Image (cartoon, rainbow, N blue to C red):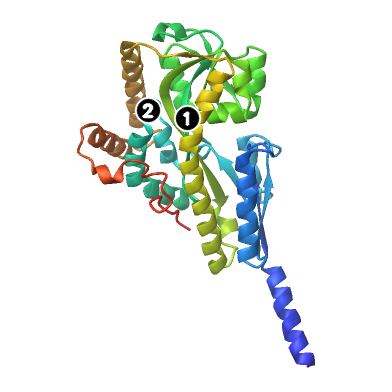
Amino acid sequence: MKKIILITLGLLLGGIANAQTLKIATLAPEASEWMKALREAGKNIETRTEGRVKIKYYGGGIQGSDDQVLRKMRIGSLQGGVFLPLVLQDAYRDIVLYTLPLVFESEDEAAYVRQRLDGRLMEGLNEAGYVGFGFAATGFAIIMSNEPIYVVDDLQGKKVWVPENDAISYAAMKDLALSPQTLPLSDVYTGLQTRLIDIIAASPIGALVMQWHTKVKYITDVPLVYTVGLMAIDKRAFNKIRPDDQVIVSEVMTELYARFDQKNIVDDAGAKQALLNSGIQRIVPEKSEVTELRRVMEETNRRLAENGEYSLELFDEMLSYVDEYRNGKRDTATVAGAASDPEKTPASGD
């Protein structure tokens, strides 16, 4: 009897010793639907791993800027974060490919490309030392401003927000004769409030969640940048989890991000309507102005690829899929909703 008790105690203590808590930071506000879904997934993981893996979230940006979060991940005080791709570009340069200005014209076009590249990008991220669980699109960033933007010339000289360390957006804004102002996400609201910045490019969902829409009067409805988010966990921390529990974490989080991806497409349309309902005026520029905007951005995107900001080979491959879609060479059965179908979204590497 004593031997059985000792064995049982040993198993319990072993289970406690092997328990891992993943501390993950995000800018998502505590009361947001995103945060509620993240916490639900965390509870699911804890239940399925019988308490061996727990997830603790720090919402609302309380862990600081993205750079601060990455530093905390390096020293082990955090194990992961929810990021925009550009935050991870220093580790894996090609993670930003989807978010290059004016690459995609529609959600379906992006879905067609993503079906062919999502898995490759997640593999690259894994090789760079991070475990990801897929991308969640948050709609197209559009121009939001306090003065109407009808033509390309209306942009000149305006102070535009550029995220920290975003060399791609900085170069693009300079090429459009704008005045880039670098700020962390957490300071954008104050920047708009104090007129430190005149213009932002943000998805309707993001603008609503972060309350930026309360500080702008106009939206210029051009699909400027395809926006996606992702969760990244430090691979060293992830590998401390026992293999069967790694499978559970990957399964739950991949399913969650597939749901986010699917739901956000619907939510984006509703968010844009919510912006208009709040009194913001919608501007649809002339086709010739959009063509000129695309011309400038195409030159910028290629120059940056040639300068090594991201792989020229993979950039050209992405554009080849865009051309396939636009020229009707695609398999139509795999286009609509492909990126947002949980059964078709590629799982990340472990």
Number of marks in the rendered image: 2
Reply above or below: 174 against 262: above
Decide: marks 2, 1 in contact (CB < 8 A)?
A: no
Amino acid type, label 2: Leu
Q: Position of residue 297 (x, y in %)?
A: 36, 21
Mark 1 residue element: helix
Q: Which mark is residue 269?
A: 1
Q: Real-space Cα distance between discs 2 and 1?
A: 31 Å
Q: Position of residue 90 (x, y in %)?
A: 49, 39
Instruction: Classify 10 Å Cα crowding around label 1: few (below 14), some (14-19), many (20 and above).
Output: few
Instruction: Classify 10 Å Cα crowding around label 2: few (below 14), some (14-19), many (20 and above).
Output: some
Reply above or below: 234 against 182: below
Q: Which mark is residue 31?
A: none
* 201 relative position to 56: left or right: left
Mark 2 residue element: helix
Task: Name the residue at 44% across, 11% down.
Answer: 177
Reply above or below: 8 against 303: below
Residue found at the very far bottom of the displayed protein: 1
Task: Name the residue at 51% across, 63% down.
Answer: 247
* 233 relative position to 99: left or right: right
What residue is disc 2 on? 304
Q: Position of residue 248 (x, y in %)?
A: 54, 62
Q: Nearer the viewer, residue 212 or 307?
A: 212
Q: Earlier in the sequence, mark 2 or mark 1?
A: 1
Of badges 2 and 1, the one in the foreground is 1
